[in-house]
């Protein structure tokens, strides 16, 4: 089976591998208080050590992390919907079991990430409110519909593939709890990517109708997957600061190119065309055509094909779960009261 398909060039193209060898690491900032950041924080960054919840950190660093980790957590939870759409219609018991496990993994990722945000003082209930009130983002990719079974394969192959390229460097990010959560998440995403590839390979080697279904899914998911990496570098307001703080290790365009370089050879193995007439090898990279950024910004504004459906579904699930949260709180209060009473009488 594929999976060890590698790109040519200096970067090894196996999912789960990171970009640079340690000796290629970027120059580190020198510890200083000149820009108002605590010296202890600058020293941790300079030494490529992790910042932990107990450590002093600038408020802007904390806020940036809460923003990114919350968006990431929301993406995992909203990301359960497009695939969940196919659980009841999976073509075999085996496919259903695999898909069920994958969707459950995404829930787990959301929970690790909300926990990481809580170590920064964020409140999970508040983050959920921000999501359902449309005040906090989630990844643009989950606003596209899953029209056929092949879309489940395309999500695994392309969406999990893009997520891994984006997220493996975050395993080395400066904030300890986020970096550690990403190690496990990336291992699971890597497995998801392989199941998506295998699903599409089966379809593309199947009947002409199955092959056409796989091609149609690749056609529809390719460009939105490239948009997952965010706006181009010259229109990315957060990148410079996030890179200076070691939250991001590579720019959006660098990661996007890396993803294309890894994915084109995989499409060749699948026997699928990528919907870009300008795609070509320049001797070093697979260069790709113009991305339609107007589509990306429309999706971010809430005008993608499924934005409304996704948020409505999430709101409904939140409302339906209110009794569970209330019951859990009542139980916790009762336990605390009993413990207090036991202490009083002891
Ligand atoms: N969608 O200045 P930048 C997954 C926003 S998980 C929506 O470049 P930054 C697993 C950005 O937030 C997928 N919004 O921002 C899975 C910012 O807005 P703000 C999620 C986007 O923060 C698979 C503004 O545009 N992964 O797929 C997007 O440096 C299958 C300006 O952008 C992560 O969250 C977008 N695509 O970089 C689950 C990874 N791109 O906040 C289920 C961690 C940009 O200022 C099934 N996150 N924006 O109002 C990141 O690496 C970064 O947050 C980026 C954005 C790369 C998303």
Image (tube, grey):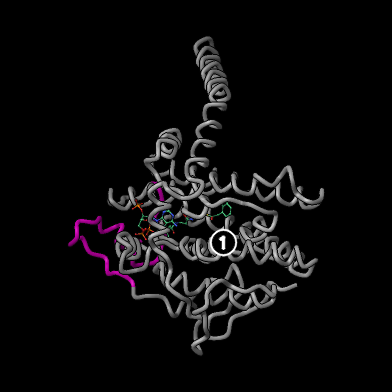
Give residue 24's quadrant in the image: bottom left
Residue nearer the viewer, 150 or 6: 150
Name which residue lies at 62% across and 79% down.
6
The percent coordinates of residue 139 (x first, y second) are 47, 52
Question: Which element type, helix, strand or loop, lies under badge 1?
Answer: helix
Total numbered badges shown on the rendered structure: 1
**Highlighted range, magenta:** 28-53
At x 62%, y 78%, the residue is: 265
Relative depth, front residue between 58 and 84: 84
Q: Most extreme residue toward the bottom, as rendered?
A: 283
Extreme residue in the left direction: 34
The residue at which mark 1 appears reads as 221
Percent x, y of residue 66: 38, 47
Image check: 66 left or right of 109? left
Above or below — where is 72 with respect to 251? above
Q: Is residue 120 left or right of residue 188?
A: left
Magenta stretch contains residue 168: no
Report which quarter residue 342 is drawn in. top right
Q: Quadrant of the N terminus?
A: bottom right
| Crowding at mark 1 (Cα within 10 Å: few <14, some 14-19, many 20+) | many
- Residue beneath the point at 61% across and 51% down: 146
- Image quadrant for the C terminus? top right
Where does the image place residue 56, in percent across and percent down from the top left?
A: 31, 50
The residue closer to the viewer here, 254 or 205, is 205
Q: In which quarter of the image is ligand 1?
A: bottom left
Q: Relative to 266, does residue 222 appear above or below in the rendering?
A: above
Q: Can you say whether 123 is above or below 301 in the image?
A: above
Within the magenta stretch, is there residue 41?
yes
Which secondary structure type mostly characterizes the magenta part of the structure? Answer: loop
Whether the residue carrying mark 1 lies under 8 Å from ligand 1 is answered with no
């Amino acid at each position: 089976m594929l999976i060890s398909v590698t790109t040519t060039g200096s970067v090894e193209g196996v999912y789960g591998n990171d970009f640079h060898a340690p000796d290629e690491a970027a120059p580190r900032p020198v510890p200083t208080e000149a820009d108002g950041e605590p010296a202890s924080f600058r020293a941790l960054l300079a030494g490529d050590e992790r910042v932990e919840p107990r450590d002093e950190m600038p408020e802007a660093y904390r806020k940036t992390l809460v923003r990114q980790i919350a968006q990431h957590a929301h993406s995992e939870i909203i990301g359960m919907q497009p695939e969940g759409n196919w659980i009841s219609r999976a073509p075999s018991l085996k496919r259903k079991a695999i898909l069920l496990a994958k969707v459950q993994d995404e829930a787990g990722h959301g929970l690790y990430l909300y926990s990481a945000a809580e170590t920064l003082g964020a409140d999970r209930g508040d983050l959920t409110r921000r999501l359902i009130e449309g005040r906090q983002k989630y990844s643009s990719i989950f606003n596209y519909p899953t029209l056929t079974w092949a879309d489940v394969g395309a999500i695994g192959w392309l969406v999990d593939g893009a997520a891994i390229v984006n997220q493996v460097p975050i395993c080395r990010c400066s904030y300890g709890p986020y970096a550690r959560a990403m190690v496990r998440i990336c291992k699971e995403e890597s497995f998801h990517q392989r199941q998506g590839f295998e699903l599409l390979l089966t379809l593309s080697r199947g009947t002409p109708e199955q092959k056409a279904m796989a091609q149609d899914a690749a056609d529809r998911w390719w460009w939105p997957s490239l948009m997952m990496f965010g706006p181009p570098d010259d229109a990315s307001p957060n990148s410079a600061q996030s890179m200076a703080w070691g939250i991001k290790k590579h720019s959006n365009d660098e990661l996007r190119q890396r993803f294309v370089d890894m994915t084109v050879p995989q499409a060749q193995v699948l026997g699928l065309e990528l919907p870009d007439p300008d795609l070509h090898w320049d001797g070093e990279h697979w260069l790709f055509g113009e991305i339609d950024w107007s589509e990306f910004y429309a999706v971010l504004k809430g005008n993608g094909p499924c934005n409304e459906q996704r948020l409505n579904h999430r709101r409904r699930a939140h409302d339906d779960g209110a009794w569970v949260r209330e019951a859990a709180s009542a139980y916790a209060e009762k336990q605390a009261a009993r413990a207090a009473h036991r202490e009083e009488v002891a």
